[in-house]
């Protein structure tokens, strides 16, 4: 707080220069077709035309204004785009907890305003939790297939549909938190850190439905490492979710890149969270971890393939495990348009729900199968 106060004082005393503002409309459209077998008993499969198959489709507006020689005002508004139906935004819990989220936020991915200068960047509003912006950059599949990606849904970047209404999002896609203040330090010799708090805004309690996190990162522009930790509180303030993650990105040559991650979380306190295998059991002590490794090979400037593997494990209440193996190939038609194809194999420890739920929908829960595969192909355009 002291550093922030000093920074604001210096900003007010700094000489004003002619304002230079810039506003950009941007987005990403991803449309693909998928087939996933073993979705139900009797080998029921599912064919679909979907948005955001490889990367989540989105659109947004961002801008900045130079207000002094070394100070800029920044903002961002970003929304999930479901280009198969034309709808936008995603759900969150609203004022009360909802497992999947009942309130729709148009700008669900980002809605913040901030200031940046020599002492760092301070932003306020709906923002990514720190695990997304640090360890997420080392995800083995580069956050591909977000709807079934173990790091996105199971690790420190958790999903409310699986974990309940921890944090200020109170359900839904908890990769972002409402009412957040985030500070990102200046980067010195490639090293920096970030702090973030999200207020639950509940009368009589500072901790109810809150989030607090910290991360540290280092990058030389080619290789990098990041660590992140976060604590989410539930709507009663008596239970918490503690999440941690570590990621490494290493590029041994121009053609090869390696990404490794380890992440997990644990529930502390009495809370009932519906999950396959024990829908009403107390989740106190539930622990889920995800270990992953991915390798990229660049055949040419236009063609790259990624091989990735994840191992997910559950303990503390029921034991469960599942693995995912992915092969993703992308071909660039231009600097903005990419064709892609992917194959995914999921293998659970058994056909029991506590194992197959860790496959994140790739294996139909209750289908009687412990493995399944998915094929996907599509096109992605950045604008």
Image (tube, rainbow, N blue to C red):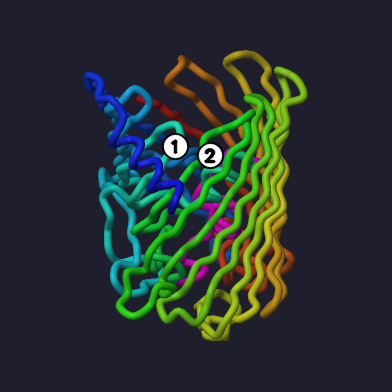
Q: Say if residue 84 shows up in the picture.
A: no
Residue at point 67%, 20% (across, down): 298
Q: Position of residue 295 (x, y in %)?
A: 72, 34
Which residue is more in the foreground, 192 or 130? 192
Residue labelled with disc 1: 32
Picture quarter containing residue 354? bottom right
Q: Earlier in the sequence, mark 2 or mark 1?
A: 1
Q: Which residues are magenta?
A: 140-164
What is the distance, in whole Å, between disc 2 and disc 1 at their CAs? 7 Å
Instruction: Confirm whether the magenta stretch covers residue 27.
Output: no
Residue at point 43%, 49% (across, down): 182
Residue 376 image label:
2
Asked if the residue under mark 1 is in contact with the one under mark 2, i.e. CB atoms within 8 Å, the reply is yes
Q: Is residue 109 left or right of residue 326?
A: left
Instruction: Confirm whether the magenta stretch covers residue 142.
Output: yes
Quarter containing the C terminus: top left
Q: Position of residue 207 (x, y in %)?
A: 44, 73
Q: Secondary structure at mark 2?
A: strand
Q: Secondary structure at mark 1?
A: strand
Q: Position of residue 255 (x, y in %)?
A: 71, 19
Picture quarter containing residue 355? bottom right
Dominant SS type (magenta): loop
Q: Is residue 306 left or right of residue 205?
A: right
Above or below 186: residue 330? above
Q: Is residue 261 left or right of residue 103?
A: right
């Amino acid at each position: 707080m002291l550093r922030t106060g000093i920074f604001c004082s210096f900003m007010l005393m700094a000489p004003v220069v002619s304002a230079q503002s810039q506003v950009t409309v941007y987005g990403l459209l991803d449309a693909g077709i998928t087939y996933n077998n073993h979705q139900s008993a009797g080998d029921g499969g599912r064919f679909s035309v979907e948005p955001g198959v490889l990367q989540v489709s989105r659109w947004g507006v961002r801008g900045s204004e130079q207000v002094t020689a070394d100070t800029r005002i920044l903002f961002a508004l970003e929304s999930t785009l479901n280009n198969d139906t034309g709808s936008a935004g995603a759900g969150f819990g609203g004022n009360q907890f909802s497992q999947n989220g009942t309130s729709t936020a148009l700008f669900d991915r980002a809605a913040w305003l901030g200031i940046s200068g020599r002492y760092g960047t301070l932003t306020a509003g709906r923002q990514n939790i720190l695990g997304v912006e640090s360890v997420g950059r080392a995800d083995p599949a580069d956050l591909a297939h977000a709807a079934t990606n173990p790091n996105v849904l199971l690790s420190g970047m958790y999903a409310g549909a699986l974990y309940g209404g921890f944090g200020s999002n109170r359900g839904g896609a908890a990769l972002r938190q409402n009412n957040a203040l985030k500070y990102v330090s200046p980067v010195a010799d490639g090293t920096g850190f970030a702090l973030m708090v999200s207020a639950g805004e509940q009368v009589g309690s500072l901790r109810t439905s809150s989030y607090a996190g910290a991360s540290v990162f280092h990058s030389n522009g080619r290789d990098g490492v990041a660590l992140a930790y976060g604590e989410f509180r539930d709507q009663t303030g008596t239970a918490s979710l503690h999440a941690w993650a570590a990621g490494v990105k290493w590029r041994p040559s121009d053609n090869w890149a390696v990404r490794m991650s380890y992440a997990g979380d644990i529930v502390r306190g009495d809370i009932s969270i519906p999950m396959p295998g024990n829908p009403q059991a107390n989740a106190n002590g539930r622990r889920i971890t995800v270990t992953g490794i991915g390798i990229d090979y660049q055949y040419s400037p236009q063609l790259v393939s990624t091989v990735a593997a994840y191992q997910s494990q559950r303990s503390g209440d029921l034991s469960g495990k599942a693995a995912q193996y992915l092969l993703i190939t992308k071909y660039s038609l231009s600097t903005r348009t990419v064709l892609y194809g992917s194959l995914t194999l999921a293998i659970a420890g058994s056909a029991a729900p506590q194992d197959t739920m860790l496959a994140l929908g790739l294996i139909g829960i209750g289908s009687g199968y412990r493995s399944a595969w998915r094929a996907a192909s599509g096109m992605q355009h950045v604008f």
